[in-house]
Image (cartoon, helix red, strand yellow):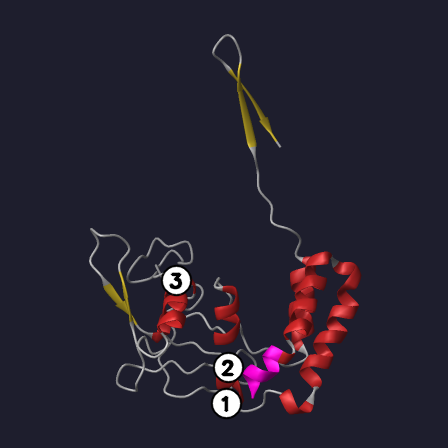
Amino acid sequence: MYHGAIYRDFNVVQAVILLISVGMVFINLAVDILYAYLDRKEDAIRSTEDIDQVVCAEFPDPVIQPILFNIVASHMVHGPCGIFNSKSPCCDTDGICTKHFPHALLSTTQITDDSYPKYRRRSLKDGGYEYKYQKSQKDDPIYLNNGWVVPYNPWLLKVYEAHLNVEICSTVKACKYLHKYVFKGSDKAQIKVVQTNNNGKYNTYLL
Ligand SMILES: [Zn+2]
């Protein structure tokens, strides 16, 4: 049902993405489209079963879905950080991941009052799968469970084959989220240009 809905509304989703990227001139229109998309009754996401049809936070079966498994392993695994790498940029001074990975393993999806749902992340015992991760040939492999998977939509992930985090955000707070992304500004960087003169000394310019 929902894969069909996403496919049918793929152009709408693309339109929203395009309008956001074009600029804030179109923000009202983008919000209207998003509202229309979220309000339609037959596609409204209300139950945990609905959520499971749209968002997945697990490694797929590597035998039945080897292509999707490889895409998830390549693009949708966080870190690994914390106990595996406390110096990761996502970790605080205590080596704890500020993005809350690895997430707790759950046998079923849970809806929370004022946050994203807690997505199903099954353990091996519950029928989940894990990924053998090896940073390089000389490093020992580590086994990552579903707690390390960034939530995604299987259909969209196979279309784009890139990091593509999909979350359930079906309340009026979606507008607040959208506005935050439009008004937070573009990425910024400092660039230093260094020029050597005839004396072997440097003139530097900070842009
Ligand atoms: Zn992390």
Mark 1, Cα crowd under 10 Å, few <14 / some 14-19 / many 20+, is some
The residue lying at 37 percent from left, 63 percent from top is 96
CA distance for labels 2 and 3: 24 Å
Contact? badges 1 and 2 (CB < 8 Å)? yes
**Residues at marks 1 and 2, CA–CA distance in whole angstroms:** 9 Å
Q: Earlier in the sequence, mark 2 or mark 3?
A: 3
Q: Earlier in the sequence, mark 1 or mark 2?
A: 1
Query: What are the residue bounds of the magenta stretch?
Result: 1-7
Q: CA distance from mark 3 to mark 1?
A: 27 Å
Residue linked to disc 2: 117
Characterize the local packing of mark 2: few (<14), some (14-19) or many (20 or more) Cα atoms within 10 angstroms.
some
Where ligand 1 lies, by quadrant? bottom left
| Mark positioned earlier in the residue sequence (3 or 1) | 1
Q: Quadrant of residue 104?
A: bottom left
Q: Residues within 10 Å of mark 3 (few under 14, many from 20)?
A: few
Q: Does 122 sit above or below residue 197?
A: below
